[in-house]
Amino acid sequence: MEQKLKTDFDKFISTSNFSNQEIKLKKQALDNFLKNGFPSRKLENWKFSDINQIIQKNIGELVFYNNYNIENEVNDDIFIKEIEHNKIVIINGKVERLSFEYEESDKINLTTLDNFNQNPNEDNSLLSLNNSFSNKIRNILVKKNYSFKKPLIIYQITNEKVSNTNINFQLNFELEENSSINIINLSDDNSEKNFINNLYNFNLSKNAILKNYKIDKKNNTNIKYDYSSIIQKENSISETFIFSSGSDYVKNEVNCYLEGKYSSAFINGIHLLSKNKNHEIRTKTNHLYENTKSYQLIKSVIDDSSKSVYQGKIYVNSKAQKTDGYQLSKAVLLNEQAEFNAKPELEIYADDVKCSHGSTSGSLDEDSIFYLMSRGLDQKTAKELLINGFLLDVVEKITDEEIKKLIKNIIGLN
Amino acid sequence: MRDKQIEDLKDYKYGFSTDIESFKAPKGLNEEVIRFISNIKKEPDWLLQWRLKAFERLKVLKEPDWQKPKYPKIDYQDLYYYSAPKSFKEKPKNLEDLDPKLLETYKKLGIPLQEQKRLNGIAVDAVFDSVSVATTFKDTLTEKGIIFCSISEAIQKHPDLVRKYLGSVIPITDHFFATLNSAVFTDGSFVYIPPNVKCPMELSTYFRINASDTGQFERTLIIADKGSYVSYLEGCTAPMRDENQLHAANVELIALDDAEIKYSTVQNWYPGDKDGKGGIYNFVTKRGLCKGKNSKISWTQVETGSAITWKYPSCILKGDNSIGEFYSIAITNNHQKADTGTKMIHLGKNTKSKIISKGISAGKSDMTYRGLVDISKNAFNSTNYTQCDSLLMGNKCGAHTVPYIKNKNSNSNIAHEATTSKISEDQLHYCQQRGLNQEEAVGLIVNGFCKEVLQQLPMEFAVEAQKLVGISLEGSVG
């Protein structure tokens, strides 16, 4: 693999036009990845789902070279009709369209970064892989006191032109003081057996508000790793919603750094799995300052021989007094082959805090099914009704009404 | 200088050591030492081979390093693996034959053996360094057919039982410290309860680490045959030492059909001084196997001592309808560190487990609850309930919760909850208003916090443990 990585990297650099600074950083990142390789079970973070093994088993030999010079056609049919929205269309890791037609153009600054962040990563070699092979990194800056009028929908598309390929993509958002943005991240995969590695960086200044909704619904055989880093200053709010269902393997990682007082982070997620899927959510909320708050709610419905994993960590350093942290994960196993693993973790170094977590897993409540059946529903409908209610709990946490409605439509929960 | 030493000694109530000449194996860990230990204990050949096999395995094993509390590297070649008080080369016949100095030591610890025999109704198998000193109350137990003796004695007298069960729960292929113990274990307790016998008294062992530089490698084996019941107590204190002392014991419990074992521990080993110097490394492997149907194993622990406590008393619920329980209080103060919890492995149908863990950290200490609940594919209709609460005192300490939850059976339910908080100002205020000083108020609240676990302890222990909770937190308030 090492040789393959090196030749693919050389080919990639020679066919792209990066500045010397970028090439230097990319080389460093590659070296770091070569040193560590794909993460495996040996690392605590990957204990429950060994991505190295999964890639080997499902894809085999990966191609790391991705030709960003190919033009991909954007098909307007895929766009959401229900609501007016701004668009970013990404096809096979390349930004094909950026349109902020509903916004004031002088309030947004679009740039590319040539000095990318090597990330505050904790031995995460996939971030290094991303840094070394991703295309030019776009940075979207929302200026002071500006709130997006319409949501931004990021269409993350793969088409049949790629297979057995590693696609790396990176996007940066910077929210200045008092600004706000709503983002919907919609996956649309028409390809098979790729390893897609996404990295999102969000930087929230004072009073900024970020709402980020991620939806992976379409069935496909891709393997996905999705990493978000959210840095939050005073009074800022971040809301992340994850609906994870379609791809064969997905690991969503959300890292929040609550650096300013009164900042808060909310992460809600759904795993709706059937067949032979393996999905994981890992959240880490770092409480680094006084009076910060975080809340996580993760629900899984697992059928057939699927596997759902939740790893959640609340970290409170000694400065972060008056922290309020809460975490709840619930899972329903519908089949004997289904599996749920959880590791809700608290790491606390301050005494004046209120932190708790809960985790439950088991079958659907027999009494509830019985009750519904005694009211005339058949067993299947009764179960569906209960599952719907179980998951709706998470969807209802979405604070934007319009988007909530849209998401309910997309994922088919009413 | 001397005054200071005395001052230091005062801090630790049990900080003293008796100077009995020790009979030691040469320093170091090698085949000769293992042969030496085996030889001096007149062990049969199969056991020697078993030890050597463990030692072979040990050579390829690496010391684990995933735990939260880190410690300086231990030089295993610089330890003594066997030491026995010299006057014990020939075993005493009864208590009166004991070295008076040794008896004195026990007196300071609060267990006057002779009196205990008459008054307490507890049989004590006291382990001093690595050789069993005396075993009391044999007669009452013998009448019922209960075997309660040192493991060395059991190897001589009941080799079949030992051979059948030794290493059946903690095999020699286990992790580093367990395997180290298998290779070099010196002594420990052996209990066998015959079918349908309820052990009429609490069985108890006092461990005591004495000789300097001696790692303690105890091995305890408890077998409860069909329909029997036993409650076993383990309590520890250790004299003050400057260098760190390693303690890597193995405890194996086996419960057959309808049997129940209750294992309680109060651990108060020397925790090191205020600056974190010295103290015991308590790296113990405790594992219980619910082998038969309807069996039950219950662990209760009060952990207040040791510089580093690193242990996970576990239950393997193999028999159908078996039950595993774990009740724990862990208190760390000053520079103490603890990484403790349990593992509940559900294999049989209708198995149940319950985990109640209370952690209190004060001073500059660090405490971690780490636990595993694993419900396997065939463990139909199993349930687990876990609750772990942590209390923090001051902002220089840490409290962490790291539960691993694995559910592979859709008919089984797992519920887990954890909280971390501090003592509420309101409660403190209320108590102080009623005339308690701050320290008393904290003691009262902490006792309430621990009540759920304390009430699981046998009477004799509960009182001691309650006191210990208070003593452990002295000086941590304000």
Image (tube, coloured by chain):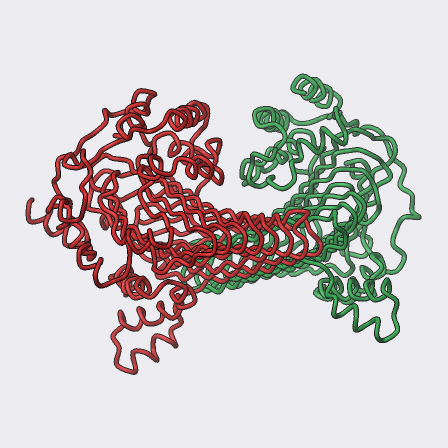
Chain colours: A green, B red
Quarter of the view holding residue B180: top left
Give percent across and percent down for residue A374: 84, 74
Q: Viewer-proximal residue, B247 or A139?
A: B247
Q: Dividing the image into 4 quarters, which one contains the N terminus of chain B?
A: top left
Residue drawn at x 53%, y 62% as measured from the top left: A356
Which quarter shows the C terminus of chain B?
Answer: bottom left
* Residue A140 visible somewhere in the drawing: yes
In the rendered view, tell whether residue B255 sits above or below residue B440.
above
Q: Is residue A165 left or right of residue B356?
A: right
Compared across the picture, whether A22 is left or right of B272 comes to: right
Single out the residue that lies furthest toward the left: B2
Left or right of residue B350: residue B441:
left
Q: Which of the pair B282/B83 is nearer the observer?
A: B83
Q: Give the farthest residue toward the right.
A: A77
Q: Position of residue B198 (x, y in %)?
A: 42, 59
> Looking at the image, can residue A98 be seen?
no
Tell me the residue at 79%/27% (across/down): A67
Q: Nearer the viewer, residue A172 or A145?
A: A172
| Callout count | 0
